[in-house]
Image (cartoon, coloured by chain):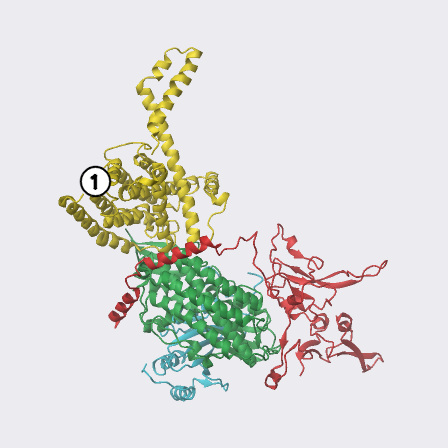
Amino acid sequence: MAEMWINMGPQHPMTHGLWNMRIKVDGETITDAEPVIGYLHRGWEKMTEDRRYPQIIPMSDRLCYGSSFTWSHVYCMAVEDLMGIEVPEKAKYIRAMSDELQRIGNHLMWLAAIGPDLGNLTIFLYALREREMFLDLFQSLCGARMTYNYCRIGGVRNDAPPNWDRDLVRTLDYFEKRMNEYEELVDRNKVFRMRMEDLAPLSGKDAVNLGITGPTLRGSGVKYDIRQNDPYEIYDELDWHMCTADEGDTYARYRVRMDEMRMSVQIVRDILKKMPKTGPIRVKPPRNAPVGTGMARMEDPRGESLMYVIGDGTDKPYRLSVRSPLFVILSASPVLLRGNKIADLPSILGMIDVCMGETDR
Amino acid sequence: MAESKKTNRQKELGLTGFIFRPMWLTLKQTLKSSRHRPNTVQYPWEKLVLPDVYRGRPGLRFEKCIGCGICMRMCPTRCIDLLEVDDIKHEEGKPPAKVKRPRVNVGRCMMCGYCAEYCPTDAMIVTPEYELASYTREEMIYDPYKLQFAGVPGNEVHILEVLPSELKKDVPPRPHVKNVDLPVVEDKKCIGCSRCAKDCPVEAVKMVEVGVNEKGRPIKRPVFDKEKCVSCETCVEVCPKSALTLQEVQ
Amino acid sequence: MYLDIWQLLTGLVHWLMVNIIGAILGWIGFHGVEHWLGTPGVLNFVTIIVVGLVVFIVGMLVSITLIWQERKELGRLMDRRGTQVGPIGLFQNFADALKVLVKEHIVPEAADSMVYNVAPVIIIGVSLMMMVTIPYSPGFYMSNSQLSVLLTLALFGVVPFAVLLGGWASNNKYTLIGGMRAAAQIIAYEVPLLLSVVGVVILAGSLNFFDIVAWQQSHVWLVLPMIIGAIVFTISMIAELERVPFDLPEAEAELVEGWGTEYGGMRFGLIMMSEYARGFIGSSMITLLFLGGWDMPAFLNFIPDGIWFLAKVFIVFGIIIWIRGALPRVRTDQILNLGWRRLLPLAVVNIAIAIAFKTLGWF
Amino acid sequence: MEENVTYTVEQVKSKISEAFPAAVKFESKAKPRRLFMTADKGSLFNLCKFMKDQLGFDHCSLVSGVDRCDRMQVVYHISSFSNNITAEIVVDIPRDNPEIDAITPLWEGANWHERETYDMFGIIFKGHPKLERLLLPADYTFFPMRKDCDTGRH
């Protein structure tokens, strides 16, 4: 068969979101690939130039449906950096806790998505079933299930509801049992292992040069986690360690994410222990930001997210620039794809957890 | 190195891990979900139990609202506008007074809850109503009467915050830190038209004579009552000469 | 205990033709026609058509029930409810059929329209033709050919050819890759499928389903001596049926709907229907060859043979569904590796075991 | 990059000012693990090369453009995995001729960021392997993130 270009997308079961992966195939083997994005471009950065600082928080929630809290969190941190606000101690703990819950939720969404990618719907429903519990937790915390609008400049929206600790501990206990089930279903499954092992290997050096961050980078054996290397809230005081894997193949990326879910459970338990019971949770931010710049970076579930704010003395930002982790990882996807089979395309791209909302912005 | 890793992985898999572990797991799940009810919720017939804080469409308590327009200005999607409507309560025989109340385009609303959060009188609340589909777009525009919702105390959203300077002083957080954002008048631009005093929803603006001009007419300047002001920006918007700005006054 | 459908229907047809239609025609004035209607040639012809209709209807009903079973069982596997239209979801298939019936027939402009139209006809026709060879009980069957096993397997081999035709004629890159995958897969799996049957044939000494079942009734279910063959046959049969984990030709994650991407409306409905018809045939082949067909313990003799056979078919199909729920899809190169490197040697080993049993005279 | 050599912010500052005494100016802002500097247009590529090869800055986080109405700015956020420092380099470029050297040859991860900046601001990165429209359709003639872009008209 001669070589031909195939459009995987923009409307295709493989694409999580609206984008197009053009691949050149020789028979079943991918010889070249080219991602085409921009179908979901909403002009987010231009839109923020016409909104007040608090009004951008719900918008930054909508950067990604899967990890909305972390996006509003990084936005708030950037603006706090610009305004020079210190966040109350309790709010820091609540933010870190929500971050970790969001990380679990997002990784569960990813776990759900790789099931149909690899051809098994069961894991999809199992993972979404447990994600529901975390959505319920967020719902009792802030009243919304997906776009939380919970983080505020200078703190968080409200305190945790009564019985929060009890519900959370119960959910985590149950979830840890369920984690074992996923590992039975995926790790102990010969076919899953056949599909994932030794697939699309990426060395640590290449990964660093390509700008890949997050679990994909840690799957290649690079020990870099912004929570540890550039700690932002109270992560330097918590009892946790970084999860890495050395092999750099798809299965290693899978393992890193699964380990991160367990680690997030441990972090949340630690936070519950150390969190102050009372105290302010929110500082009133100034209405007008000073002239200057603010920058914040944090460990999104998918990688390093960074926001850069320029204030010009009014209550609207002069310029807000976003670094989305997937924007960079997608630019590196041809390197991952070359030489693999068509059938591996969904699993490789599923393993980097594609979300187009934050990529196109 | 890589070889030893691979054998480790094989060992992990073990003999039982061929395909029987996942099959055993799914069999267990089948038995479980056949004996109990499955996990799914039969949506139109069964519904999830929602907490009081659930953010559905915004609701309005008509009597509490003062028509300040903070909700309109804080709305990120600009789906709220103020509408002059008849007051609900009026004495018999008299025509009802005209009051300003918010109207919400629920089709554009993104349920962020800012209107309830920033409302100085807790007149706007979040409601647990989320089934908002309708056949026309006009039905999605909720006028102030349709927007009314009695609500329970849990539907109110309170801001509990402290000032940055009070962070280390162990001051208890309190709702709506007032007296911080106040309108500041620029003396040269002000023409003393007293529009701000007329339009202020909480009557926090008083016009004070500060002297007379060369024609002998009194020069009036607005003075803002710190206690009453809710920092709603109405005066800033109506000022014909843009003499007012909202600034932090410490 | 079984119902002899041929005897019953021959009598019924004779009574209808001679006593009812013949009498009516005679009363109208066509004298002598009832004699012609009573001749064995005409009676046999009509009886064959009637029996075929009955077998076809029963087969389609079973296939529809298999769709329902798959939906319900997969639902429970995944902790959800499955279909819910009508009482315990039984009407879902009819609703679906109604939906696809009212859809428009769309032929892609660039498609080779003749081949495009013929390919589903071949698939559906062949799938239904396979029902001819399958006996439900000693009395409920359509044909009793001496080579019925071989005939069924040969018909199985026709389908991927039509899949390749359809995939090529749709003039779509996804369908083309899907068709090619179907061709590669069938070459890899047809061989172990046939070889694993050889063991059964050696032991039972016949290529006729009735003889094989009769042998199992008198000796032992073939799944016990031929356990390797049974496993190889089941795996190959799943690959033949193009079901998860071997549903590469229609891998929906990467190839949209695989070779059937361009088929819509009732064509899609019938293709799906014929897939389940083949699922029924495959499960019944496993039942007949390895699980003793309608053989049953003596104390359960009051259950009719046909019911017993269908119960086994449903259990076998349930296991296939269960595998679908637990496993993901295998990659193209891995599926070929599995077929050529694992299953083929195992099938040969199975033949050697069968020969050993036969020469040692254990059976 | 040598292994196990880490620098503090002060050391990085002194090294850079040694190598680029005139071109690089440091800002007075001081935050832990942050480095703020401005560079001029010509020396940017050499500065980046120096930072990558000598100081272990091996990750380009973000390249973003800013339209300051009288001039354009390109802001680079470059972070180091070994030093845990994030450097912010601001480069001014003239508005009527927005050209700058691409850093994609150094860090592959800056590829799409530079394309996006070109897409939104019209800043031309010399030496970029494929400088085309990324998010917007290829036939657009305007650059939407510039402050003088009339968004209502388009």
Chain C painted colour: yellow
Q: Colour of chain A?
A: green
- Mark 1 crowdedness (10 Å alpha carbons): few <14, some 14-19, many ≥20: many
Specify whether residue C79 is in view. no
Residue A37 x %, y %? 44, 61
Location of residue C303 with respect to A57 vertically, above or below: above
Q: Is residue A213 above or below residue C75?
A: below
The chain letter corresponding to cyan is D
Q: Residue at x 37, y 60 (%)?
A: A185
Looking at this view, is D96 or C333 the one in front?
A: C333
Closer-to-camera residue (B135/C228): C228
Total count of labels: 1
Q: Residue at x 20, y 43 (%)?
A: C198
Residue at 65% x, 70% y is B118
Q: Quadrant of the C terminus of chain C?
A: top left
Tell me the quarter of the image containing the N terminus of chain C. Answer: top left
The three-letter code of the residue at mark 1 reads: Ala
Q: According to the image, label 1 marks what residue?
A: C204
